[in-house]
Amino acid sequence: MEEFLQHVINGVSLGSIYALIALGYTMVYGILQLINFAHSDVYMVGAFVGFYAARFLNIADSPSYTSFFTILLIAMAGCALLGFSIERFAYRPLRNAPRLNVLITAIGVSLFLEYTGQVVFGATPQLFPNILEDSIIFSFGGARVTKMDATILVTAVGLMIVLRHIIQNTLLGKAMRATSFNRHWASLMGISVDRIISMTFIIGSALAGAGAVLVGMKYPKIEPLMGVMIGLKAFVAAVLGGIGNIPGAVLGGLVIGIAEEFVVGYISSTYRDALAFSILIVILLFRPAGLLGRFSVEKV
């Protein structure tokens, strides 16, 4: 029982990170019907923004919650700026182009960020600075809840609550929902569609930056290709929950995180990365719309 509870705690902590990154995929898809393959590399850049900011501010000399939130906000701001730039200069000129053109561009931007990262940051893995001292908060049933896991979960849940508030209770959120429903009709209602799309990229990229800092805390090795695998897993989480469905992305992230932790704990770590793709195959075979997605008929 002790081992089981510990795996649940670790799985929820990991799943909340997957959920943050999956939200970026699902928000962009909901607005543009586009899989933004560059999103995982925005996450990678966020990790290095946090890394260099922590070194510049000497955060490792005084790890605390103040240091944590400082690096979190800097990484989120850096990723938000990068997400805006990608949308403005790579995707917006192709707004009316065939969907395949935009998809190829997304892959190209992803590769550009990965290999530019190797040139700028170097291919050698770096150790993410210690920005928060870890300790055991409490134990129950033999399982331990650490300050790190609690901080990751509370931060992720807090950001999800803020996102839900923005989407459900603000004018920006209403405009995003209208644009998602029909971009042409939204523009006729006076909504600046380009502005709403940019804001979607900014918010989704900021969440990826937050996820990067949380991953850097828990798994401190960072390198320019770190976004490839976790990005694929977050994409699977978005598909599992229902691509374009925000609660679905959160559910999918938690399911992937918990399932992955149990596979590592009870079967073998060898199958850790294979699990996500196995789940993707199953969901595409038996419920292509995802757990919370809705089936729709498209007129052609």
Image: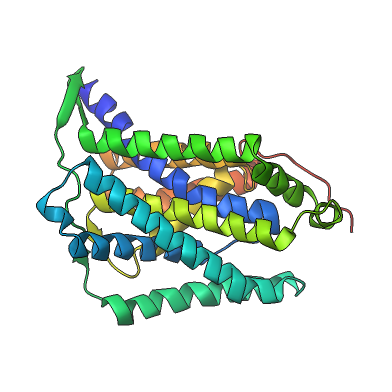
- The residue positioned 60% from the left and 55% from the top of the image is 200
Residue 132 locus on image (x, y percent): 19, 44
Q: Is residue 35 above or below residue 284?
A: below
Residue 59 locus on image (x, y percent): 17, 54
- The residue positioned 62% from the left and 40% from the top of the image is 167
Residue at the extreme left:
61
Q: Can the viewer see residue 22?
A: yes
Name the foreground residue: 274 vs 300. Answer: 300
Left or right of 175: which side holds 127? left
The image quadrant that residue 286 belongs to is: top right
- The residue positioned 28% from the left and 32% from the top of the image is 150
Quarter of the figure that contains the N terminus: top left
Q: How is the image coloured?
A: rainbow
Residue 159 locus on image (x, y percent): 45, 40
Quarter of the figure that contains the C terminus: bottom right
Left or right of 71: which side holds 183? right
Report how many numbered discs are placed on residues in the image. Answer: 0
Name the foreground residue: 120 vs 241. Answer: 120
Q: Is residue 259 above or below residue 270?
A: above
Residue at the extreme top:
141
- The residue positioned 70% from the left and 63% from the top of the image is 194
Name the foreground residue: 120 vs 187. Answer: 187
Name the foreground residue: 57 vs 246. Answer: 57
Residue 281 locus on image (x, y percent): 55, 50
Q: Can the viewer see residue 33?
A: no
Residue at the extreme right:
300
